[in-house]
């Protein structure tokens, strides 16, 4: 009989697979239909890619946690696992923030041509992924260790 934790992990795995499939379905028309090639949809594709990245990480994490938890939390893989955990999870809120910054700039500076170009979108997206990678670097030095002061 499966315990409650295994059932919760199974539900999470199903949720992550469904999220990945829906994000891919959402991206396909934006990439292949010419009339959807605008700046706003570039940010939408970036958000979908960040969600796919996050869900893929957590999908593999829960698979490994279910089938081989000792390998997942081993001394060699622990730092890498915690780095990618922070980076992949951080990219989704950062994608939402950079999309909101784009919307703010396009509304406040509606007469500026620069905020309507794809160059602006590329600058925002590259800075978002760079910030996500850089903010996750301190996780490497911590090594995933937790101190208990009790």
Image (cartoon, rainbow, N blue to C red):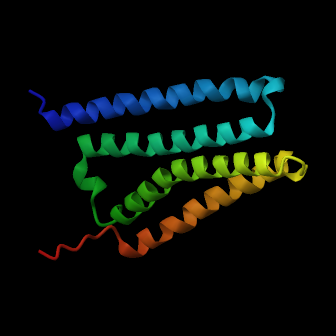
Q: Residue at x 24, y 50 (%)?
A: 69
| Nearest the eye: 73 or 109 | 109
Number of numbered discs: 0
- Residue 145 higher or lower than 30, as above or below: below
| Nearest the eye: 75 or 84 | 84
Percent x, y for residue 49?
Answer: 60, 41
Percent x, y for residue 25?
Answer: 60, 23
Give left or right: position of 64 versus 98: left
Q: Residue furthest front?
A: 108
Q: Residue at x 70, y 56 (%)?
A: 126
- Residue 75 higher or lower than 111, as above or below: below
Q: Quadrant of the C terminus?
A: bottom left
Q: Quadrant of the N terminus?
A: top left
- Residue 113 higher or lower than 2, as above or below: below
Percent x, y for residue 60?
Answer: 39, 42
Give left or right: position of 129 versus 106: left
Q: Residue furthest left?
A: 1
Q: Determine which quarter of the picture holds residue 18.
A: top left
| Nearest the eye: 110 or 21 | 110
Give left or right: position of 131 versus 120: left
Q: Residue at x 57, y 53 (%)?
A: 94
Percent x, y for residue 147?
Answer: 22, 74
Q: Residue at x 88, y 52 (%)?
A: 114
């Amino acid at each position: 009989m499966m315990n409650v934790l295994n059932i919760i992990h199974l539900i999470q795995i199903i949720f992550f697979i469904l999220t990945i499939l829906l994000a891919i379905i959402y991206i396909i028309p934006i990439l292949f239909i010419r009339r959807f090639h605008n700046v706003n949809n570039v940010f939408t594709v970036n958000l979908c890619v960040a969600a796919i990245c996050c869900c893929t990480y957590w999908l593999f994490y829960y698979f490994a946690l279910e089938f081989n938890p000792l390998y997942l939390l081993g001394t060699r893989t622990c730092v890498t696992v915690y780095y990618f955990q922070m980076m992949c999870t951080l990219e989704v809120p950062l994608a939402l923030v950079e999309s909101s910054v784009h919307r703010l700039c396009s509304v406040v500076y509606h007469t500026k041509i620069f905020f309507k170009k794809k160059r602006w979108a590329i600058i925002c997206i590259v800075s978002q992924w760079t910030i996500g990678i850089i903010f996750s670097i301190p996780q490497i030095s911590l090594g995933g260790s937790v101190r208990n002061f009790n």
